[in-house]
Every structure is written in C-alpha cells, then in structure tokens.
Amino acid sequence: MTQDHTLKSFDQDLDELRQLLGDLATWVTDELEQAILALISGNGAAAAEVIERDATADALQLQIQKAAVNILVRHQPVAIDLREVVATERMAGDLERVGDHAKNIAKRTIALGAPVPEAHAASVERFGRDVERMLHKVLDALSKRDAVAAHRAWSDDEPLDEAHADLFMVLLNAMQDGRTSVLVGTHLLFVAKSLERIGDHATNVAEDIRFMVTGQITPPR
C-alpha cells in the first residue's frame, strides 16, 4: 500500500467520523427543541415522537465509537489527529446523553398530560431556551474548530446553574404553599434538572473542543 493511498484512506475515515459527529449533534439539538415545544404545549404525541427518535442518537453514538476504534487501529494517529479522534468519541458520549435528557423531558410531558401551568410556563420555557442557546454556541464552536468560542460558551454554564437554582426554589415554594400540586411540581423539578444536566454536557463538549484544538485541558472553575 502506497503512502498516498494510506493518507487518503485516513482522510476518508476521519471525514466519516466528523460527519457522524455532525449528524449526532444535529439530531440531539432537534430532539431537545422538540422536547421543549412538546413540554410547553402539553403535546403528548410530539413527546412520544421524541422518545422514539432517541434510538437514532444511540445508534449514531455506537457508529462513532466503532469508527473511532477503526481509525486508532488502522492508522495509529498522533498529535492533533489523535486528539480529534479521542475528543470526538468523548463528545459523542455527551451528545448522546443530551438526547437521553430530551427523552426524559418528553416522558415527563406525557406524565403531566397537560401544558405547563401558566404560572411556570414562561420561566420553564426561558430556562429551556437558554440551555438550547448554550448548546448551539458550543456546537457552532465545534463546527468552526474555535477553541476561544468554545471557552466563551463554557462560561455560560455558571449562569445556567444559577437559573436552575432559582427555578428549583420557585417550584418548591409553589408546592409548599399549595399554588402548584406536588405531582406537577415534582415533574417540573425533574424537567429542570434534565435541562441543567444538558448544560453540563454542553460544557463537557466545550472542554473537549479546547483540548482537541489546543491540547490544553480546561481547569475547573
């Protein structure tokens, strides 16, 4: 096998890995968007579709794992190429978990059986949209291989944690004083936690982008 052929084969395998990661990113961001829409509107049928669609995210993650192993075994990449393969496999795991949390939100929507109560609809939707925006920022940084933009998106997680804490207390107080039933409040608390965890996974992806591009590991806050 000639060196040129080997290099071409490596480039093709790496392009396939990148495409699979892009497909997974697109799929789970759509899952999240649809899950939030279904939640706010109380659309059980749309929520059920989100749950069904998550199997595709799982399958894409598995394809990425296999493709990454294939590259490591066949080509034994080094330096930035090795970092990209390792980081891609890790990012795929976090993105698959984003899909899992979107599925969990959809399950809570079906359990609620109605739109989010008016008293909480605006704050829950706002939190969900903030999480969506952070995820989009991270994935835009990934598409551009932009470590600086990834770090800026990474910084968005702290305000999200604060917003989650505020929403948690609002829901808890509403349950305690009887303005919101314990059943509804509990489901919304789990929804809020799933959204907060999506922010955490987006943060992990941002850290992996920085590692992939620069070789540097993001220090803890």
Image (cartoon, rainbow, N blue to C red):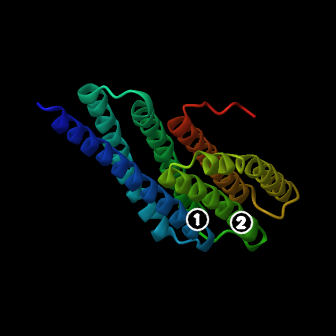
- Left or right of 205? Residue 172 is right
**Which residue is depicted at the point 26% across and 38% down?**
10
Name the residue tied to disc 2.
126
Q: Residues within 10 Å of mark 1 (few under 14, many from 20)?
A: many
Residue for point 68% across, 53% down? 192
* Residue 158 seen by the camera: yes
Distance of label 1 from label 2 (alpha carbons): 10 Å
Tell me the element at label 1. Answer: helix
Rendered position, 121 above or below 23: below
> In the image, is residue 9 above or below residue 142?
above
Q: Residue 35, position in %: x, y?
A: 53, 63
Q: How many other residues sit within 10 Å of disc 2, few (<14), some (14-19) or many (≥20)?
A: few
Left or right of 6 on screen, residue 135 = right
Q: Which residue is mark 1?
A: 36
Q: Amino acid at mark 1?
A: Ile
Vertical position of residue 95 compared to residue 126: above or below:
above
Residue 11 found in image quarter: top left
The one of 169 and 93 positioned closer to us in this rendering? 93
Q: Which one is nearer the viewer's eye here, 191 or 210?
A: 210
Callout 2: SS:
helix
Ranked by sequence position, the earlier of labels 1 and 2 is: 1
Residue 193 in view: no
Residue type pointed to by label 2: Arg
Q: Quadrant of the C terminus?
A: top right
Task: Find residue 205 and report its image quarter.
Answer: top right
Residue 34 lies, with reference to residue 86, above or below; the image says below
Instruction: Please state the horizontal and vertical placement of residue 139, each as a whole percent of the image.
Output: 53, 54
Task: Give residue 69's position: percent from left, percent from top.
Answer: 31, 30
155 displayed left or right of 198: right
The number of numbered discs placed on residues in the rendered structure image is 2
The x, y position of residue 108, in whole percent, is 58, 57
> In which image quadrant can residue 211 be found?
top right
